[in-house]
Image: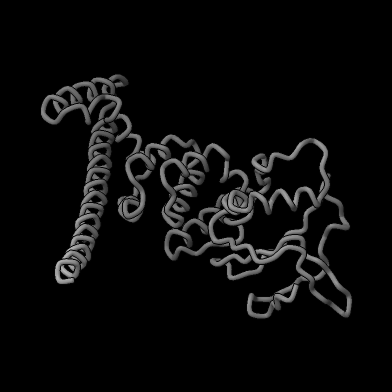
């Protein structure tokens, strides 16, 4: 019994020590990545500033080539001409050091490589801030960009000044607005529906692929109910799908319709309920 007790205690000790080591290694890796990424930004900014001082058209090419040879000889392939151009573009795309420092807490160098060549600054800022808030991996970020997430948000349809203000609020207070949440259209190819199907088929397919549907909706959504009955003025109404959004602190009712939008689809009653007011009887 004594040997077994010692072995048990040793196992607990080793498990705790492994956890400590793994956490320390992870923290070191994050710190090293942030330090290197900030270095790349500073290198790019310094070269970019030097290029701007010169009027000669070919000076930038000559400078990058010369600097690359010198740095590669001293520090290795991390400073190739291609890498230096990435760094210069990084400094161009993100000129504000405070914004870069804030993003470094969540974004790696590979995240920034996916962002810096996006053509629209507002598009770039949207993906950077959403990536920071929702902690996307590089792969997830690339998928969001490929699916044109920004272009599908309600926010992207607003005037530039409003977009800038919403992104500023997101940057300063992590405030998620409805315009950042809702999209048009939603991409539902993963449901596998054929050319002809009914609204009930669409609802069933969403519930079968609920996890992927929630991913398409975006972060913060929780599924509550299907065909939720509500009563208004003694009349029964049924909500096809009912969700709750944590950041918005709102219930999201989804009514599934096929075909083009029609005027009669407009909901004339605005239901302002929070989750505590909803009874889940069926």
- The residue sitting at 27% across, 37% down in the picture is 44
Residue 154 visible in this rendered orientation of the protein = no
Q: Position of residue 143 (x, y in %)?
A: 51, 40
Name the colouring of the figure. one colour
Residue 89: which quarter of the image? top left
Give the total of numbered labels: 0
Farthest residue to the left: give it. Answer: 74
| Image height of 93 relative to 233, above or below | above
Name above or below for residue 210 compared with residue 65.
Answer: below
- The residue lying toward the viewer, choosing from 67 and 181, is 181
Outermost residue toward the front in this view:
1
Q: Residue 201: x, y in percent?
A: 78, 48
174 to the left or right of 196: left
Q: Is residue 280 left or right of residue 168?
A: right
- Which residue: 66% across, 68% down? 251
Q: Residue 58: x percent and y percent?
A: 29, 19
Can I make out residue 135 in this image?
Answer: yes
Q: Is residue 167 left or right of residue 7?
A: right
Assign the N terminus to one quadrant of the image: bottom left
Where is residue 263 drawn, in percent x and y? 87, 55
Q: Quadrant of residue 54?
A: top left
* Residue drawn at point x = 64 percent, y = 75 percent: 275
Q: Quadrant of the C terminus?
A: bottom right
Task: Say which of 141 and 177 sits in front.
Answer: 141
Residue at image position (47%, 37%) is 118
């Amino acid at each position: 019994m004594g040997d077994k007790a010692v072995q048990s205690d040793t196992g607990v000790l080793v498990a705790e020590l492994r956890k400590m080591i793994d956490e320390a290694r992870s923290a070191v890796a994050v710190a090293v990545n942030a330090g290197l990424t900030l270095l790349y930004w500073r290198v790019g900014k310094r070269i970019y500033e030097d290029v701007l001082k010169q009027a000669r058209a070919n000076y930038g090419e000559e400078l990058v080539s010369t600097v690359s040879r010198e740095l590669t000889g001293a520090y290795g392939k991390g400073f190739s001409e291609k890498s230096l151009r990435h760094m210069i573009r990084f400094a161009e795309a993100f000129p504000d050091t405070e914004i870069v420092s804030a993003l470094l807490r969540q974004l790696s160098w590979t995240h920034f490589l996916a962002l810096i060549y996006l053509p629209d600054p507002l598009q770039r800022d949207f993906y950077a801030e959403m990536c920071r808030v929702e902690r996307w991996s590089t792969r997830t970020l690339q998928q969001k960009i490929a699916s044109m997430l920004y272009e599908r948000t309600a926010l992207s349809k607003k005037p530039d000044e409003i977009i800038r203000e919403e992104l500023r609020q997101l940057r300063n207070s992590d405030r998620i607005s409805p315009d950042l949440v809702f999209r048009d259209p939603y991409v539902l190819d993963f449901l596998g529906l054929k050319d002809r199907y009914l609204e009930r088929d669409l609802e069933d397919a969403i519930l079968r692929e609920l996890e992927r549907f929630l991913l398409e909706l975006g972060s913060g959504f929780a599924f509550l109910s299907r065909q939720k009955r509500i009563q208004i003025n003694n009349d029964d109404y049924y909500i096809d799908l009912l969700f709750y959004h944590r950041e918005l602190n709102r219930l999201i009712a989804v009514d599934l319709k096929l075909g083009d939008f029609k005027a009669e689809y407009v909901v004339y009653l605005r239901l302002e309920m929070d989750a505590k007011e909803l009874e889940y009887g069926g």
